[in-house]
Amino acid sequence: MLPFRLTCIAASLLALSACGGGSDEPGRGALLEPPTTVATLSVAQIDATSASLGLQPLSGTAHCDVKVVALHYATPGARAGEHSDASGVLLVPSGSYAGCSGPAPLVAYAPGTSVEKPRTLADPQNDETFLLAAMYAAQGYAVVATDYLGYARSSYSFHPYLHADSEASSVLDAIRAARTAASSVGASLSGKAMLAGYSQGGHSSAAAQRAAERDAPAEFNIVAAAHMAGPYNLSGSLRVPEAIAGIQFFVPFFITAWQKIYGDVYTDVKTVFKDPYAATIENLLPSPTLTDTTLITTGKLPGGTPTQARDALFQPAFLTGIQTDPNHPLAVAARRNDLLGWTPRAKVLLCGGAGDPTIPPAVHQNVLKADFDSRGVTNVVSVDVDAQVQATFGPGGAAPTDPTSADYATYYGNYHGSYEPPFCHAQAKALFDSVK
């Protein structure tokens, strides 16, 4: 083994150095405090909840108890030279079942968007945390999930939303933190790693795979990845004239984040956003106190249909500019965070549902798959779970067609956030089972 200083010199040749930037800085992924077990979910608890949610046909019954372990680790900020921190969770399988105590493969998970700054996956009541516990950890996988910069325990001053490089760092440094924490919380890791992410997390997990395989393949033994319902084609999405569901949350989030990172997305916030929203939008998300519902009911963001929300929030000249000018500053920033043009080494699953009103596969997943195909990439599979969503949740087993109906509002209001994820996770689990 190399002495520490020589190890750091060698590692510094990689963009993903595990060493700190100076003698007083902790290394990348270093634990900033001891890992803390906040709860243990028993097999009986997991089975009761997964059955009540209708998840069990996809997840299977639990084989392992699951420890929920809070992590706090070092990771860089979004701008060059910044040192910061993030929190997250390590889910540890335990129990007498044969698959619960041996060396486990590690699933590194990137979560979807939250507008709530206190959100942490080190919370057994969190829906995403339970899904990870039931689908993976209770089946013998260890799972580590980042909370990202700017959330929960992180001291970073903002969340660099849909910024590919810092998302990748948050995910990969969580793997480092999990490896360090494992022995102290009763986890045994096999050395195999899988990447997974949903929604924003699909963008993050793809960015993490690209970075790991490009910059540190010897350190990260990535054997498979599942990128689910992610916005991989951000620059292309700017040119789509139709407003997506949730536009008033997602689009200002990345516009203001990229302005903080790059400094040139706009010169005056009022050229992008209308009053009264322009006055507070730059520091609104994520919110320390408000939810997606109360952001609208308190007037911080507009409600209504996607088109109504878009037209209430954005200046018309700004919308025209991003849809027609490929050199618009926002388009330039978006291209910097697209996830096109790279070649994965490990097996990849792309998963989504054709009816997704928030991240339409026609704009993102299908474009990414076509990009891979155009360069002869053969280790990527693309799956559409829309038929399963319709059969399970559609009235009469089909998607509702009347936009004025309550069924339509319920179905499409829940499609991206609730209906689609379990089906994609089941596809991811099948891939991971084949290589674990």
Image (cartoon, helix red, strand yellow):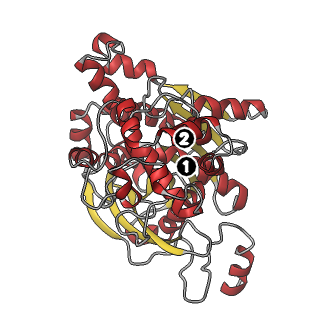
Count of picture labels: 2
Question: If the image is split into quadrants, where does the N terminus sit?
Answer: bottom right
Q: Quadrant of residue 91 in the image?
A: bottom left
Task: Name the amino acid type tagged 2.
Answer: His
Instruction: Confirm whether residue 285 shows in the render.
Output: no
Which quadrant is home to the C terminus?
top right
- The dot on residue 227 is 2
Measure the C-alpha gap from mark 2 to mark 1. Answer: 6 Å
Label 1's element?
helix
Q: In this view, does 37 lie above or below 66?
A: below
Label disc, if present, on residue 205 of the rendered structure = 1
Q: What residue type is labelled 1?
A: Ser
Task: Choose between 358 and 230: the one closer to the eye.
Answer: 358
Badge 2 marks a residue whose secondary structure is strand
* Mark 2 residue crowding within 10 angstroms, few (<14) / some (14–19) / many (20+): many
Question: Residue 382: which numbered mark, if any?
Answer: none
